[in-house]
């Protein structure tokens, strides 16, 4: 059975492609623009060398957003197309002593990589549903980072305009954010009638319980050490508007993420959330990043995929400090960390394991990482055997 292995090196405006047969002979090599004509030229080269598209495997490196359109085009033609971590290609290229680097040579390297790994190449492929699932999870993560950054900016402004307020209440409740949009400084509050302040606080609360009264806010404003800054009083309402918008988008994406998870991975979601400390959001994000658990041969490969595998620097009698590699999926690594903190707080089994590692002498961060490894081992076994979480006696 004749097979065709196509390596593609993608850039913003163009791509290079090289096709190899099962013996490693070059069938074609081309460069084309990243447009419809270029895509058609690639398809013509593929079909002229392999009539049955089921026997074609195409691969490209992950390039941010530039590879997505070509990936989607080839997938729509029923060509098995995979996206490969550039680090794998880079390490594979180091096996050659030649230093020359061009787009065509890079595409040849990718083609040789998939030829060498043809028996395991399926683990690199993901379905469009999984890709969409992952994109939503990562967009939600991005918005979470923006929310955290915006909150820090608001805190810095309040340190100038009304530093006492943060110690009196949570300034990031919807009520207080809306109130601060109208009264962004202690100076504003001092210059306003007490009745107006009370009415504004009640209006912003809209029936919600308010943890602080208007009298407390006015008293704090009158005794405030705040500086007068017209610029910050103008900037703060804009920052608050941005934060409220981001929080609204986060809620929408959270609903979309959990609904997607329920539609394509409901069984896996029920399994993973059977562990106390793992909620719907972190569970869904974890499943979005790993895709099919069968892509991983063992829990060790899943740990390495997340970049949580240990690295040891050793030469002769010297042995350096062991650290995690951080060479895998940074999104998955962050999610696993959040899940680990959650189970340490809420799950008696993992909390006991964490405390045991601390008693063994591990510092806090290493004990957390040890618990993360334990958590991944448990999750891998649960997803592989389709079983829910339960604790056996003496299982620590």
Image: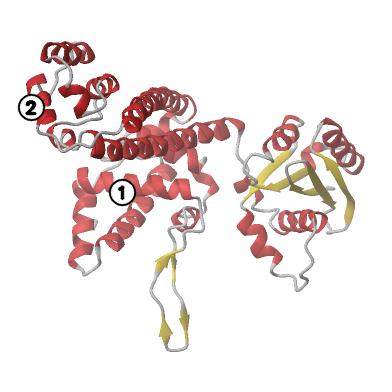
Give the x, y percent position of residue 261: 45, 29
Q: Is residue 375 left or right of residue 293?
A: left
**Label 1 – label 2 distance at C-alpha:** 43 Å
Q: Provide the residue designation for mark 2.
A: 219
Q: Residue at x 50, y 50 (%)?
A: 329
* Label 2, residues with CA under 10 Å away: few <14, some 14-19, many ≥20: few
Q: Residue at x 72, y 59 (%)?
A: 116
Q: Nearer the viewer, residue 386 or 209?
A: 209
Give the x, y percent position of residue 56: 78, 43
Q: Nearer the viewer, residue 31 or 5?
A: 31
Indicate which disc, 1 or 2, sits on the residue closer to the N terminus.
Answer: 2
Considering the numbered disc 1 on the image, is that residue within a helix, a strand or a loop?
Answer: helix
Residue 154 in view, yes or no: yes
Residue 298 is tagged as none
Q: Residue at x 30, y 63 (%)?
A: 366
* Label 1, residues with CA under 10 Å away: few <14, some 14-19, many ≥20: many
Residue 95 sits in quarter: bottom right
Q: Is residue 155 left or right of residue 79?
A: left
Q: Residue at x 37, y 33 (%)?
A: 281
Residue that lies at the very extreme toward the bottom in this rendered image: 317
Q: Provide the residue designation for mark 1.
A: 340
Q: Quadrant of the C terminus?
A: bottom left
Q: Nearer the viewer, residue 193 or 253?
A: 193
Circle 1/circle 2 CB separation < 8 Å: no
Position of 243 relative to 51 (above/below): above
Give the x, y percent position of residue 270: 36, 32
């Amino acid at each position: 059975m004749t097979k065709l292995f196509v390596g593609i090196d993608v850039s913003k405006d163009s791509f290079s492609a090289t096709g190899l047969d099962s013996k490693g002979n070059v069938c074609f090599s081309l460069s084309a623009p990243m447009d419809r004509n270029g895509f058609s030229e690639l398809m013509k080269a593929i079909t002229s060398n392999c009539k049955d598209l089921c026997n074609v495997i195409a691969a490209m490196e992950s390039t941010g957003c530039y590879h997505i359109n070509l990936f989607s085009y080839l997938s729509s033609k029923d060509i098995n197309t995979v996206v490969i971590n550039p680090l794998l290609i880079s390490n594979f290229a180091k096996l050659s002593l030649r230093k020359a680097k061009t787009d065509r040579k890079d595409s040849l390297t990718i083609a040789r990589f998939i030829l060498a790994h043809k028996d395991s190449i399926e683990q690199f492929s993901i379905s469009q549903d999984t890709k969409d699932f992952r994109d939503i999870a990562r967009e939600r993560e991005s918005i979470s980072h923006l929310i955290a950054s915006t909150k820090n900016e608001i805190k810095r402004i309040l340190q100038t305009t009304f530093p006492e307020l943060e110690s009196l209440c949570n300034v990031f409740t919807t009520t207080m954010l809306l109130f601060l949009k109208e009264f962004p400084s202690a100076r504003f509050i001092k210059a306003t009638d007490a009745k107006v302040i009370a009415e504004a606080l009640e209006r912003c609360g809209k029936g919600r319980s308010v943890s602080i009264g208007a009298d407390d806010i006015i008293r704090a404003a009158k005794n405030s050490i705040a500086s007068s800054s017209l610029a910050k009083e103008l900037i703060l309402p804009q920052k608050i508007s941005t934060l409220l918008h981001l929080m609204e988008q986060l809620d929408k994406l959270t609903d979309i993420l959990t609904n997607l998870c329920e539609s394509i991975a409901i069984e896996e979601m029920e399994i993973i959330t059977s562990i106390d400390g793992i909620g719907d959001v972190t569970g869904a994000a974890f499943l979005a990043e790993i895709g099919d658990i069968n892509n991983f041969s063992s829990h060790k490969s899943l740990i390495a995929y997340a970049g949580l595998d240990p690295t040891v620097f050793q030469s002769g009698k010297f042995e350096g400090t062991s650290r995690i590699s951080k060479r895998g999926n940074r999104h998955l690594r962050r999610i696993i960390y959040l899940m680990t903190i959650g189970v340490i707080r809420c799950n008696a089994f993992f909390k006991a394991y964490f405390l045991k590692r601390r008693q063994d002498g591990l510092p806090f961060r290493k004990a957390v990482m040890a618990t993360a490894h334990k958590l991944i081992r448990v999750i891998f076994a649960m997803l592989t055997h389709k079983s829910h979480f339960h604790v056996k006696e003496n299982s620590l």
